[in-house]
Image: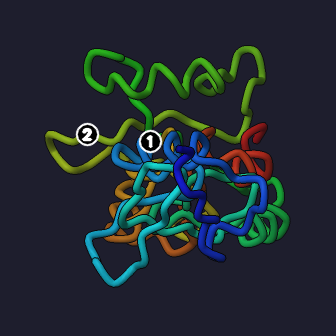
Amino acid sequence: AKPEYHPPPPSCHSPTMNFRTVALLVAASSRSTVCGFSPVASSSIAAARFGAQNINNFTVRNMSAASSEPRKAGVSSPTDIKEFVSSAGSSLLVVDARHPDASVEPGDAKSLAVAGFPDKDSNFRPNAINLPWSRESNSMEVPEVDKDTPIITHCGGGGRGQKAKDYLESVGFTKVLNGGGPKETECWAEYGDK
């Protein structure tokens, strides 16, 4: 006898979503928020039954197709970054908080493969400087610019970029945004070449 088919609940938003698709997404969600799925502990969310298999406790996030994960806390929106860059003009300073030594910050190797460090000699990212965030000292070198210079901090995806932003504000800088980094492609598109 064939197992009885039960269609997915309305929250799946797809008449073509099949068991294999849901199973793969739910399995991936136990490690991350891949494709907008995330595990939840609440038993109040109805379970879905596909074929003979049960898929319990999942939820679907309403996310844009452009991003599979939400931005990290503190990362500015692409619109805010675009306005900031426009108003800053040539006075913009981009502070790259990534570390040049992959043994210190292994995650930086991935983002550096996408977007390298600023290089004044080749005019690559001419408004940017590399001032690595130190996890050991919870600090960084301070840029030698006026305290009201418009600054965008970044790392690979925004975590250390936020720490750098907070630190620069704590020492008196007044116009600082966290731009995320190359992982945040929509944000990076607004300032990554600066």
Please name the residue that numbered disc 1 is placed on.
Answer: 28
Figure check: 35 above or below 7: above
Q: Marks 2 and 1: which is nearer the front?
A: 1
Circle 2 residues within 10 Å: few <14, some 14–19, many ≥20: some
Q: In the drawing, does residue 66 fall left or right of residue 9?
A: right
Q: In the drawing, does residue 185 fall left or right of residue 167?
A: right
Which residue is at a point 71% across and 46% down the rendered structure image? 188
Q: Nearer the viewer, residue 50 or 81?
A: 50
Distance from the alpha carbon under mark 2 to that under mark 1: 32 Å
Image location (x, y in percent) of residue 112: 55, 22
Q: Earlier in the sequence, mark 2 or mark 1?
A: 1
Decide if residue 129 is in sight here: yes
**Residue sitting farthest toward the left:** 136
Image location (x, y in percent) of residue 87: 81, 70
Which residue is at a point 40% across and 52% down the rendered structure image? 159
Circle 1 residues within 10 Å: few <14, some 14–19, many ≥20: some
**Residue sitting farthest toward the bottom:** 44
Q: Are marks 2 and 1 in contact (CB under 8 Å)?
A: no
Mark linked to residue 182: none
Q: Nearer the viewer, residue 76 or 119?
A: 76
Callout 1, which amino acid? Ala
Image location (x, y in percent) of residue 43: 28, 78
SS of the residue under disc 1:
helix
SS of the residue under disc 2:
loop
Q: Nearer the viewer, residue 52 or 27?
A: 52
Callout 2, which amino acid? Ser
Please name the residue that numbered disc 2 is placed on.
Answer: 134
Which residue is at a point 32% across and 70% down the rendered structure image? 170
Image location (x, y in percent) of residue 41: 26, 70
Which residue is at a point 41% across and 42% down the rendered structure image? 27
Figure check: 106 above or below 29: above
**Residue sitting farthest toward the front:** 1
